[in-house]
Amino acid sequence: MLEVTASRDLLTGKAFVWDIITDFRNYRSWHPFATISGNALKGEKIEYSLNVVAERFGDHDIAARVTSAEPLNQICWSYGLFRIFSVEEWFSTTTVPGGTRVVHGMRFKGPLASLFRKRLIRQVSPMLEASVEALVRHATAPGTAGKLRRSSSNRLGRKRRRSKTSGS
């Protein structure tokens, strides 16, 4: 198994961040690589499109399923060839002093994940970093509070740490 994450602390409440990461319909407006259609509810099928894959192999949706949806805490979806190569992607939020920590992560399983471990780390780490940076920009953009439930008047993002990897 391989896990890659990126995180940021935002000076805003969890509800505000949660509204952004579970509003699949509007991912295109802030997420640099992904579009998602469907409902952010556990067990729901969603259509997921990772644009970096589309650039290389053509535009197509990936059938995925929401495997976890714990309001204000974590949303996770899974896709792949489940015995050969599977991906669990998630966002989680935790309360930290003065705001919310958001973590975007991907967990890779199966023999292909082991085979392509170094390549996955090299390619996925910058993608996750870019997605959390885009989330911070979106959350701090003027007018965003009017589009989502207001949780705080100060929405400045601060970098938490670089991507980390772990595996066994």
Image (tube, rainbow, N blue to C red):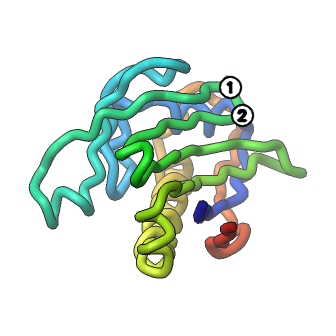
Kindly indicate whether the residue at mark 1 contacts the one at mark 2 (C-beta within 8 angstroms): yes
Q: Nearer the viewer, residue 5 or 95?
A: 5
Residue drawn at the location 60% of the way across and 28% of the way down = 68
| Residue 73's disc number | 2
| Residue 20's disc number | none
Q: Amino acid at mark 2?
A: Asn
Relative image position of residue 82 (x, y in whole percent): 42, 43
Q: On screen, 160 above or below 82?
A: below
Relative image position of residue 139 (x, y in whole percent): 54, 47
Kindly give the residue lying farthest to the right in the view shown.
97
Residue drawn at the location 69% of the way across and 67% of the way down = 168
Looking at the image, residue 47 sits to the left or right of residue 73; the answer is: left
Residue 136: name its quadrant. Answer: bottom right
Q: Is residue 147 visible?
A: no
Looking at the image, residue 25 sits to the left or right of residue 158; the answer is: left
Q: On screen, 33 above or below 72?
A: below
Q: On screen, 22 above or below 17?
A: above
Relative image position of residue 128 (x, y in whole percent): 50, 63
Q: Nearer the viewer, residue 73 or 3?
A: 3
Q: Nearer the viewer, residue 70 or 12?
A: 70
Residue 57: name its quadrant. Answer: bottom left
- Local crowd at mark 1 within 10 Å, few (<14), some, or many (≥20)? few
Element assignment for label 2: loop
Kindly give the residue lying farthest to the left in the view shown.
58
Relative image position of residue 165 (x, y in whole percent): 64, 71
Q: Is residue 134 visible?
A: yes
Looking at the image, residue 40 sits to the left or right of residue 27; the answer is: right
Q: Amino acid at mark 1?
A: Glu
Element assignment for label 1: strand
Q: Work out which quarter of the rendered image holds the N terminus and state it.
A: bottom right
Mark 2 and mark 1: Cα distance apart in space: 5 Å
| Residue 70's disc number | 1
